[in-house]
């Protein structure tokens, strides 16, 4: 809360952060990367970025040290959530709905921060969006999340049009 204005909090799953280093030749990867970059650029002006012990643990386990170092330098956090017994207990509660281990810890940390949980993992998103679960926060893909998505989709439209024009050229020739 800054000068009476409530700032939304965002918790980016590590798969979102890794999109920055994925093969950008795939359309979905490219628009998700654009969305993540836009969200990271909007930190402090539109929302605060939440990090946690599980995020840094997962980053530290990456095989590519150069990628790991770049990733650690690619964002500035506003709030850091440390694991405690309540977070571990909450993570264990998520197992019956199909969320386990690190993913459950990420969700529990995002809930602690009252943050929107953003992920590019369809399995996690679909599981958490099913009715009758006890998730207390919003879950979404960074492209569909309003603060990132609206601006990203405006950038993507010309790319889709360009791809359509290429297909048209191939069909006509």
Image (cartoon, helix red, strand yellow):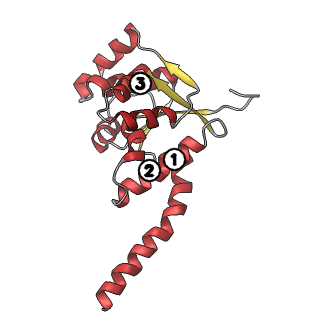
Q: Choose between 27 and 92: the one closer to the eye.
A: 27
Q: Choose between 130 and 31: the one closer to the eye.
A: 31
Task: Measuring from the top left, give residue 109's x and y in whole percent.
Answer: 43, 22
Q: Which residue is mark 1?
A: 37
Residue depicted at x 42% and y 46%: 20
Q: Disc 1 and disc 2: Cα gap in Å?
A: 6 Å
Report the quarter where the C terminus lies.
bottom left
Which is more N-terminal, label 1 or label 3?
1
| Disc marking residue 56 | 3
In the image: residue 54, left or right of residue 2: left
Task: Measuring from the top left, give residue 65's x and y in whole percent.
Answer: 36, 33
Q: Are marks 1 and 2 in contact (CB under 8 Å)?
A: yes
Which is more N-terminal, label 3 or label 2?
2
Residue depicted at x 75% and y 28%: 4
Residue 18 drawn above or below residue 114: below
Q: Which residue is mark 2?
A: 33
């Amino acid at each position: 809360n800054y000068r009476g204005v409530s700032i939304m909090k965002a918790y980016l799953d590590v798969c979102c952060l890794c999109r920055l280093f994925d093969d950008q030749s795939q359309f979905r990867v490219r628009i998700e990367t654009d969305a993540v970059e836009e969200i990271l650029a909007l930190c402090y002006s539109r929302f605060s970025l939440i990090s946690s012990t599980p995020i840094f643990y997962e980053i530290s386990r990456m095989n590519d040290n150069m990628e790991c170092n770049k990733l650690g330098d690619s964002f500035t956090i506003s709030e850091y959530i440390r694991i405690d017994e309540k977070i571990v207990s909450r993570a264990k509660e998520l197992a019956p709905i199909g969320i386990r281990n690190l993913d459950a810890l990420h969700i529990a940390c995002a809930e602690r921060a009252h943050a929107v949980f953003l992920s590019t993992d369809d399995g996690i998103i679909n599981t958490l969006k099913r009715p009758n679960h006890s998730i207390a926060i919003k879950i979404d893909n960074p492209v569909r999340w309003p603060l990132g998505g609206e601006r990203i989709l405006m950038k993507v439209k010309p790319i889709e049009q360009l791809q359509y024009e290429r297909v048209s050229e191939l069909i006509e020739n």
